Image (tube, rainbow, N blue to C red):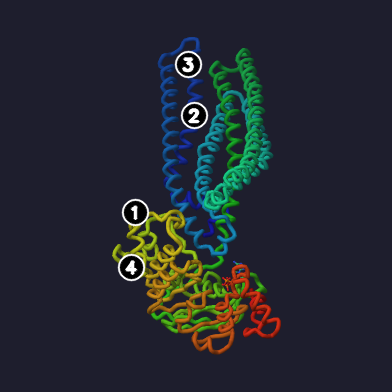
Amino acid sequence: MPFLKSPARFLLHYVTRRPLAFALLALLVVGGASSAVGVQYAMKLLIDSMTVAAPSHAAVYFALAAFVGLVAIENGLVRGAAMLLCNITVASGVRIRLDMFHYLTGHHIGFFQNQRGGSLGHRVGALTGSFQALTHRILMEITPPLIAFGGALLIFLAIDWRMAVAITGIFVAASTGLVFLGMRGDKYHKAFARAASESGGELVDLVGNIAAIKSFGARRRESERLAGFFQTEAAAQKRGWMFVERIRVLHDVALVILVGGALVWAVERWIAGGITAGDVVVVSAMTFRMLNGSRDLAMALIDTSQQFSYLRETLEIVGAPHALEDAPDAVPLQATEGEVRIEGLTFGHHPGRPVLHDLSLEVAPGQKIGIVGPSGAGKSTILQLVQRLHDPQAGRVLIDGQPIDRVTQDSLHQAVAVVPQEVLLFHRSILENIRFARPDATDAEVRAAAEAAHCAGFIALLPKGYDTIVGERGTNLSGGQRQRIGIARAFLSKAPIVLLDEATSALDTGSEIEVQQALDALMAHRTVLAVAHRLSTVVGFDRVIVVEQGRIVEDGAPLSLLRAGGAFQRLWALQAEGLDAPIERREFPRFVAGTALRMFGLSPRPPLRLVERQAAG
Ligand SMILES: Nc1ncnc2c1ncn2[C@@H]1O[C@H](COP(=O)(O)OP(=O)(O)OP(=O)(O)O)[C@@H](O)[C@H]1O
C-alpha cells in the first residue's frame, strides 16, 4: 500500500477513489465562494444605483435582484457543498478504517507485542477524523477565503489600484504573520497530544485491569495516580488553547485598526469625489471580510499542518512495512494428510542470539508428538514457526511437502488449529465465539463441535445457552470452560494439524480431566504437536522430543525414553519428586531429610539432578 507512506498520498488516494464526487464538491465550493464575492459587488451596485442624482427604478431593482439572488445562490451552494462533503467523508471514513484494519492485522505478531493495543485502535479511528478534518479545512476553510481574496482584489482594482495593493499587502502580511505565530504554538499542541495519548492509554489500561484494582482495593490509589495524568494533560491543553486565544486577541486588535484605517481612507476618497458611496461600502465590507478571512485562513493552515504531522506520525506507525508478507506467487496450502517436516531451523528473536539451532523434525500424518524440556528451551518457538508467526534465519517448515513460506498465510492458519494456554474469546455469544473458527459453519455443526469438545454440558446451564455473551475476553467463563471453547473451535476448523501449547497447564485437576477428555477427542485422526510441562499428558503420545537450549536432545516413544535413562527420564524423575516445583511448595521435612541423606552420599537420587534442574531453571 504505497499510499500509506505520506499524508499527501494518503489524502490523494481517498480523494481519487471518488473523483466525480470530489470534483462536484470543488465546483460547489468555488461557486459558493464566488457568489459571496458577487454579493459584495451587487451591494455596491445597489447603493450606487440608489445614490445617483436621478435613480432608475429598473437599475435599483436589477441590483437588488442580483444581490438577493446571489445571496440565495451562495447559501444554496455552500449548504450543498457541506452536505456532499458529509456524505463523501463519512463514506470514506468507513473505507479508511476497513483498509487500515486490514493492513494493521497483516502485521507480524511481534509488532503488536511492542504497541499498546488501545492506542493502535485509537490511531486507526483517528485516521478517519484526520481525513475528515483535512478535507473540511482545505475545502471549506482554506479555499473560500482564497477565492474571496481573489474576487476582492478584482473589485478593488476596479475601484482604486492603490487600495488593491494595500489590501493585498495587509491580507498576505496578516495571514503569514498569524501562521508564523501559530506555528510557534506547535510545541504546545504536540505536548497536549502526547499528554492526552498517555492519559487515554492509562485509562484504558486501568479499565482493562479492573479485576486487579478491585482485588487489591486500589481504587482510590489508582484514581489519585490517574489525577496526575489528567492534571498534566489539562495543563498542556490550557497552554495550547490560551496560546491560540492570545493570537486571536492580537488579530482582533489589528483588525479594528486596519478596518478603521481602510474606512477612513475610503471616506476621504469619497469626499474628494474619487469613489462612489457604493465603493465605500464595498471597500469597508470587503476589508472586514478579508481580515476576518485571513484569521480563519491562518487558523485553518495551522490546524492543517498539525493534522498533517499527526497523520504522518500515525502512518509511520500503522503503515510500517509488513515484516511477514505472503510471497507474490503464494498459493493456498493443500493440507490433506497433515505431515509436518521441519528442516534445519535456526531462529532467534535477536540476530546473533538464536533460540533454535539447526533443528529438524519429521511428524508423520496423524502422529502425536509431545515437546518437553526446561523453561526457555524454545518449545513454544517451534510451534510459532510452524504457524509462520516468524520467519527463520535458516531452514524451513513444510506441510504435506509444501514450504509454508510459499503458501498464503490465511490458508496455513486454516490448516493449523492452535489451542493455547489462554484461549482468547470475543465479547460475543458462545455460538459466535465457536463459529469464529469457520464462519460458514451451520448452527448444527457448531453444536456438534461443542459436544465433541465436552462443552455442551456447561453451555446448557448458562442463562441463554449458546446465545450467552461470554464477557470481554471470556471473563464470564472459567479457565477450563474457555479452554474447551478453544477446543470446540479447533474441532470446527477441521484443521488436520493441531498445536497444543500447554493447553492444560493452567487448570486445576477437575478441569484438567474434562479438558483432557476434550483434547483426546480432538487429537484423534489429527497430527498433533503438543508443548507440555506436565509430562503425564504426553505419556500416551506416539513420540516425545526433549528440547534443551534450542536443540532436540532426545526423540522417541515415551515409554522407551522413560526406560532409556536420558533427559526425558530425568525430567520425569524431577517432576515425580516434585523438584521442579518451588521449594516452599514442597514437603519441607522430606526435602530436609533428602538433602541430609544426599550430603552423606546416601541419597537414592544423585544430587547432580538438582544441580541440573537449578541450572536449567
Ligand atoms: N518475543 C520475544 N522476544 C524476544 N525473546 C523472546 C520472545 N519470545 C520468547 N523469547 C525468548 O526465546 C526463548 C525461547 O522461548 P520459548 O517461549 O520458546 O520457550 P519455552 O521452551 O516454550 O519456555 P516455557 O516452557 O517457559 O514456555 C526464551 O529465552 C525467551 O526468553
**What is the CA distance from the residue labelled 3 to the residue labelled 1?**
81 Å
Q: Which residue is mark 1?
A: 463
Query: Going 44% across and 16% down the picture, which residue do you hit?
Result: 60
Q: Which residue is mark 2?
A: 36
* Earlier sequence position, callout 1 versus callout 2: 2
Residue 200: percent from left, percent from top:
57, 46
Q: Which residue is mark 4?
A: 451
* Image quadrant assignment for residue 315: bottom right
Examine the rendered structure and indicate whether residue 316 appears above or below residue 45.
Answer: below
Which marked residue is nearer to the observer: mark 4 or mark 2?
4
Query: Of residues 30 and 523, which is closer to you in this image?
Result: 523
Residue 242: percent from left, percent from top:
65, 33
Which element type, helix, strand or loop, lies under badge 3?
Answer: helix
Query: Going 33% across and 67% down the picture, which residue do you hit?
Result: 451
* Earlier sequence position, callout 2 versus callout 3: 2
**Which residue is most to the left?**
444
Query: Of residues 32 and 504, which is closer to you in this image?
Result: 504
Tell me the amino acid under the disc marked 1.
Answer: Pro
Tell me the amino acid under the disc marked 2.
Answer: Ala
* Earlier sequence position, callout 4 versus callout 2: 2
* Earlier sequence position, callout 1 versus callout 4: 4
